[in-house]
């Protein structure tokens, strides 16, 4: 029960954790360090206790630095309950990067989960002269948090709820500004598209600070389902043993995870408790998508292909399990309350089947970007429209096929060639990563012999000399934390 002294708090945490009376006693959350489930009621009590220590009044900015544990989720919910905007920061940033972000954004509150790697660097920073009044205190059994002795003179727009980095854990100062409406709507869109019900248990292994990882949590909490948080890697047997033990039902993955599962044996690893598998975070080899579909089909389960961007909160489309065979290669249709269109370079709508720029429209689109504290006072700069930067086409039923990135283009012999199209063609035989060095298309592959025939066919099809392609073998393709190919690490090899 919230007292009159704290009635300024929002027990729904800005809609991220709605009250569901018949589910309040039900299990809600657990992490790898917690032997028992925490009920929704117990989690709400923990969150509200922390929220009372956060200053009321006009909206402030709270940095939440944490990994996949209950304390991190509690900190996010508590900051939203207190009416503050939350910037999610991964725990693995270098101290220098973290300090730069704090200096750029001047957060009034910084919270760090107990034991989180970022906490030690913050302790040193808070005691330094550079900290500009940041002081430290220990929350009562919750995350450690720091508060400024004086507020920033730059206000936070009241519509701003969540800030997510555009670059995962690199420490870029560029963030996506998302409203409470965008987060709430997208959680509902996902819950409906995936048919999440209160008996589901999400396997929250993707970083909480990434849009995909956050959306897994918000979409399950929204409908009264449970969330199991873990930082364990999917390549370790302990991960799957824990999934079985907690009764995990929903496995979200990126291409790296499914490539591993396909190589290592789905039947051996994935326990029978898992009923739903979702794939996002970049294009997955079509053969592996088919393998995943066939696997869940045998078990009577479901496999969903999803497409999204952080700028859309983050999901935009879903290809349902029962649509996979008919629409293979597509990423599905727009989620409820949203729409897709294909435009030419002059923003004119194109007819079904024509390739052009993919534009998404919906209430889950970001307010805009931020690169410093001053940007947090801005309101809606997008009007619900997102130019995705992707190329694609819609069929007559509204199913989207992504064909490439508008900025990932190479010009050879007078031809503009989509590097993503080259990758897509090569994935018919093997996973590859494609870059250009200005004169050639550079192809990286773990087994170059598998793709030489396809490369020769592309050279002939586009009437390019064979020397236009430089095929290189690598022991292992590098992937970012988000699961996408790490092109920057490959570029240093050119």
Image (cartoon, rainbow, N blue to C red):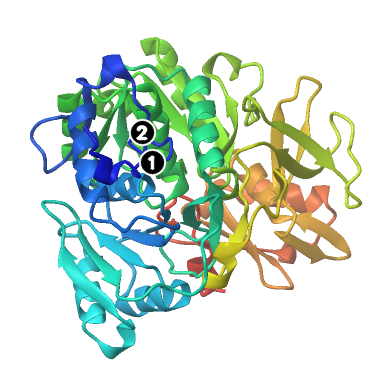
Q: Position of residue 140 (x, y in %)?
A: 12, 53
In what quadrant of the picture does the C terminus appear?
Answer: bottom right
In what quadrant of the picture does the N terminus appear?
Answer: top left
Count residues near mark 2 (Cα–Cα under 10 Å), then give few for <14, some for 14-19, many for 20+: many
Task: Tell me which corner region of the image, top left, top right, bottom left or bottom right, holds residue 276.
Answer: top left
Q: Nearer the viewer, residue 95 or 40?
A: 40
Mark 1 element type: helix
| 64 to the left or right of 431 | left
Q: Label 2: which residue?
A: 17
| 443 to the left or right of 460 | left
Residue shown at 27%/60% (left/top)? 111
Proximity of marks 1 and 2: CB atoms separated by less than 8 Å: no
Task: Give the residue at the far bottom of this rendering.
Answer: 129
Q: Nearer the viewer, mark 1 or mark 2?
A: 2
Residue shown at 54%/27% (left/top)? 189
Q: Relative to 16, say whether 473 is above or below.
A: below
Q: Relative to 175, say whether 94 is above or below.
A: below
Mark 2 element type: loop
Q: Which callout, 1 or 2, points at the residue further toward the start of the chain?
A: 2
Q: Position of residue 206 (x, y in %)?
A: 35, 44
Q: Relative to 287, say whether 145 is above or below.
A: below
Task: Give the residue at the far left of this rendering.
Answer: 35
Q: Label 1: which residue?
A: 257
Q: Nearer the viewer, residue 436 or 148?
A: 148
Q: Nearer the viewer, residue 32 or 180?
A: 180
Q: Nearer the viewer, residue 192 or 306?
A: 192
Residue shown at 67%/51% (left/top)? 420
Count residues near mark 1 (Cα–Cα under 10 Å), then give few for <14, some for 14-19, many for 20+: some
Q: What's the distance in space between the residues labelled 1 and 2, CA to CA?
A: 29 Å
- Is residue 289 in view? yes
- Is residue 284 in view? no
């Amino acid at each position: 029960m919230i007292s009159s002294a704290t009635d300024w708090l929002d027990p729904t945490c800005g809609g991220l954790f709605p009250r569901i009376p018949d589910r309040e006693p039900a299990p809600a959350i657990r992490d790898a360090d917690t032997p028992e489930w925490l009920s929704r009621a117990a989690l709400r009590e923990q969150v509200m206790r922390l929220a009372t220590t956060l200053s009321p009044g006009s909206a402030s900015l709270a940095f939440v630095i944490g990994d996949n544990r209950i304390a991190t989720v509690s900190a996010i919910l508590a900051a939203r309950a207190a009416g503050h905007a939350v910037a999610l920061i991964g725990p693995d940033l270098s101290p220098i990067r973290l300090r730069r972000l704090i200096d750029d954004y001047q957060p009034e509150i910084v919270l760090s989960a107990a034991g989180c790697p970022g906490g030690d660097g913050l302790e040193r920073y808070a005691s330094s002269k550079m900290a500009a009044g940041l002081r430290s205190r220990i929350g009562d059994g919750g995350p450690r948090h720091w508060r400024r002795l004086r507020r920033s003179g730059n206000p936070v727009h009241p519509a701003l709820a969540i800030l997510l980095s555009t670059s995962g854990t690199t420490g870029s100062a560029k963030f996506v500004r998302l409203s409470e409406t965008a987060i709430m709507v997208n959680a509902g869109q996902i819950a409906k598209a995936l048919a999440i019900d209160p008996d589901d248990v999400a396997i929250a292994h993707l970083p909480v600070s990434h849009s995909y990882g956050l959306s897994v949590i918000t979409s399950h909490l929204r409908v009264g389902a449970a969330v199991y948080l873990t930082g364990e890697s999917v390549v370790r047997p302990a991960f799957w043993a824990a999934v079985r033990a907690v009764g995990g039902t929903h496995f979200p993955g990126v291409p790296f995870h499914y490539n591993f599962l396909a190589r290592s044996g789905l039947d051996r690893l994935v326990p029978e408790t898992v009923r739903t598998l979702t794939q996002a975070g970049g294009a997955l080899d079509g053969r592996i998508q088919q393998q995943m579909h066939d696997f869940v089909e045998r078990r009577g389960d479901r496999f969903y292909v999803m497409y999204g961007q952080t700028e859309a909160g983050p999901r935009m489309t879903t290809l349902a399990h029962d649509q996979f065979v008919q629409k293979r290669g597509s990423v599905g249709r727009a989620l409820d309350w949203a729409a897709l269109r294909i435009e030419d370079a002059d923003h004119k709508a194109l007819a079904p089947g024509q390739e052009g720029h993919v534009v998404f429209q919906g209430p889950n689109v970001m307010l805009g970007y931020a690169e410093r504290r001053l940007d947090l006072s801005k309101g809606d700069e997008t009007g619900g429209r997102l130019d995705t930067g992707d190329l694609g086409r819609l069929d007559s039923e509204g199913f989207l096929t992504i064909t490439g990135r508008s900025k990932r283009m190479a010009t050879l012999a007078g031809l503009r060639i989509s590097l993503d199209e080259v990758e897509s063609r090569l994935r018919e035989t093997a996973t590859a990563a494609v870059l250009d060095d200005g004169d050639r298309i550079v192809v990286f592959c773990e087994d170059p012999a598998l793709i030489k025939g396809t490369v020769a066919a592309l050279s002939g099809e586009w009437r390019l000399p064979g020397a236009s392609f430089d095929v290189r073998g690598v022991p292992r393709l590098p992937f970012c934390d988000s699961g996408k190919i790490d092109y920057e690490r490959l570029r240093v090899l050119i």
